[in-house]
């Protein structure tokens, strides 16, 4: 009788230990999931800002000041994305940690469709981030090229303005001559005779 009570007591204690461990695992799983969901929300906010800025600057301005402002904004956005790159990497890592925690709390289940969906969503977010990040780099390269072309164009235009001003002054000098009609008749006689 005493042996049965002891074995029953040991079985209850073993069940209690398993239940306690399972409770800790569930708690860890929920905490990890909470972190991942917050990170997903933050990542979506970053993506939204990135897409908003990129769509805001779909046309290259012809004004040098606006072009410089656009480049500055995109450089700032690029720096912010570089800062947040680690957060996206951590998000991917945390999702794999959740898988291990869920597998511990669902030992008899072989497929975890909810986790598969979560992993797919996080990978999609990460791909969008990387794609947006590369778009920012491409856009910056293009804008730097446009800035250089605009600078060259402005220089050439300034040269043309100087030439036009000089030519206009010469024409005005010629038109101001009082003997212009007599000079024209003399020139016509030379060319047509």
Image: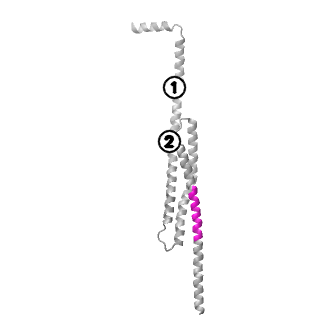
Q: Residue furthest bottom?
A: 1
Count of marks, rendered view:
2
| Callout 1 crowding tier (Cα within 10 Å): few <14, some 14–19, many ≥20 | few
Give the labeled residue for mark 2.
Answer: 142
Task: Give me the residue at 60% from left, 79% from top.
Answer: 16
Please tell me whether residue 8 is drawn above or below residue 39 in the rendered image: below
Magenta segment includes 171: no
From where the camera sits, is residue 142 visible?
A: yes
Q: Which of the 4 image quarters holds residue 11?
A: bottom right
Query: Which image quarter is the C terminus in?
Result: top left
Q: Which residue is mark 1?
A: 160
Q: Secondary structure at mark 2?
A: helix
* Mark toward the start of the polypeptide (1 vs 2): 2
Question: Looking at this view, is 138 or 54 the one in front?
Answer: 54
Q: Position of residue 74 (x, y in %)?
A: 56, 45
Checking the image for residue 107, the label placed there is: none
Q: Secondary structure at mark 1?
A: helix
């Amino acid at each position: 009788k005493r042996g049965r009570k002891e074995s029953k007591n040991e079985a209850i204690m073993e069940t209690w230990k398993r239940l306690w461990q399972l409770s800790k695992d569930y708690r860890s799983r929920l905490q990890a999931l909470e972190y991942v969901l917050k990170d997903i929300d933050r990542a979506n906010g970053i993506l939204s800002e990135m897409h908003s800025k990129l769509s805001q600057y779909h046309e290259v301005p012809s004004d040098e000041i606006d072009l410089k402002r656009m480049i500055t904004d995109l450089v700032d956005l690029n720096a912010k994305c570089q800062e947040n790159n680690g957060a996206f990497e951590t998000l991917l890592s945390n999702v794999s940690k959740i898988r291990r925690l869920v597998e511990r709390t669902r030992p008899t289940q072989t497929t975890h469709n909810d986790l598969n969906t979560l992993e797919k969503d996080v990978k999609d977010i990460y791909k969008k981030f990387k794609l947006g990040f590369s778009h920012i780099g491409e856009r910056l390269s293009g804008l730097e090229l446009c800035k250089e072309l605009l600078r060259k164009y402005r220089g050439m235009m300034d040269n043309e303005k100087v030439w036009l001003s000089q030519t206009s002054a010469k024409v005005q000098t010629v038109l101001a001559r009082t003997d212009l009609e007599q000079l024209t008749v003399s020139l016509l006689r030379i060319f047509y005779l």
